[in-house]
Image (spheres, helix red, strand yellow):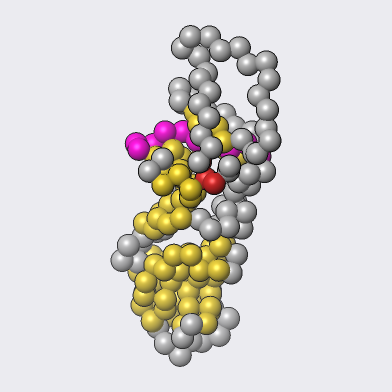
Amino acid sequence: ALWQHLWRPSQPEHLWFKVNLPKQISFRLETQPSTTRFELAIVEGEQSIKAIGPGYAALDDLVARIQLRNPKVIGPRQSSHLPLGLVAMAGGIVIASSQLTGSDVALGEVPLGFEREGDDWQLCGQASLDTASEELLLALPAGSVIEDLEVVEGQPEIIPMPEMLGLV
């Protein structure tokens, strides 16, 4: 996948994003830039949340092709209800952007399901989910009530985690 969301027990107050970009990205430009050096960043809405660093573009008409040094980007989300995007800036001005469709997370609004991935938990669904994983972390919105859950040995175990994602 191009992007994933993670929860880290070692840093329970944040939801994290992990973006795996291709080694080369292309942007369609509105106007011919005065430079081929672009600053790249991950944004939430219009707010920059993680600088990727500089990239040098090969320009072909109004298309900029940029080779990335490090195509894997990890950082904490600030406003998970907003979609993630990738922006290219020149002189501090956004000259091109691309939204990561479906990257918004309804944290605190609907149940979120997470599957274990090493030491982290990867988001596997919002509101409704299907998983083959034997272990599922389910983050419920504040005020949620679980009723009539019959717990059988070896079956679902409920462990309250009030510190998760600041959902106290």
The foreground one among 109 and 101 is 109
Q: Which residues are magenta?
A: 110-119
Quarter holding the C terminus? top right
- Quadrant for residue 119, please give it: top left
Q: Is residue 95 above or below residue 100?
A: below
Residue 39 placement (x, y as % from top left): 42, 76
Which residue lies at the image location 45% right of the left edge and 68% below the top edge?
Answer: 41
Q: Residue 30: in sight, yes or no?
A: yes
* Relative vertical location of residue 4 with respect to residue 127 in this rendering, above or below: below
Residue at screen point 41% across, 68% down: 51
Give the dominant element type of the magenta stretch: helix, strand or loop: strand
Q: Residue furthest top?
A: 153
Looking at the rendered structure, the number of numbered marks drawn on it comes to 0
Camera-nearest residue between 8 and 42:
8
Residue that lies at the very extreme toward the bottom in this rendered image: 34
Looking at the image, can residue 62 be seen? no
Q: Is residue 93 above or below residue 104?
A: below
Name the spot of residue 52 as percent of width and height, x first. 39, 67
Between 100 and 41, the one nearer to me in the picture: 41
**Residue drawn at (42%, 87%) of the image:** 35
Residue located 67% across and 43% down the image: 109
Rendered location of residue 60, percent (x, y): 45, 79
Q: Does residue 143 belong to the magenta stretch?
A: no
Residue 100 percent coordinates (x, y): 55, 57
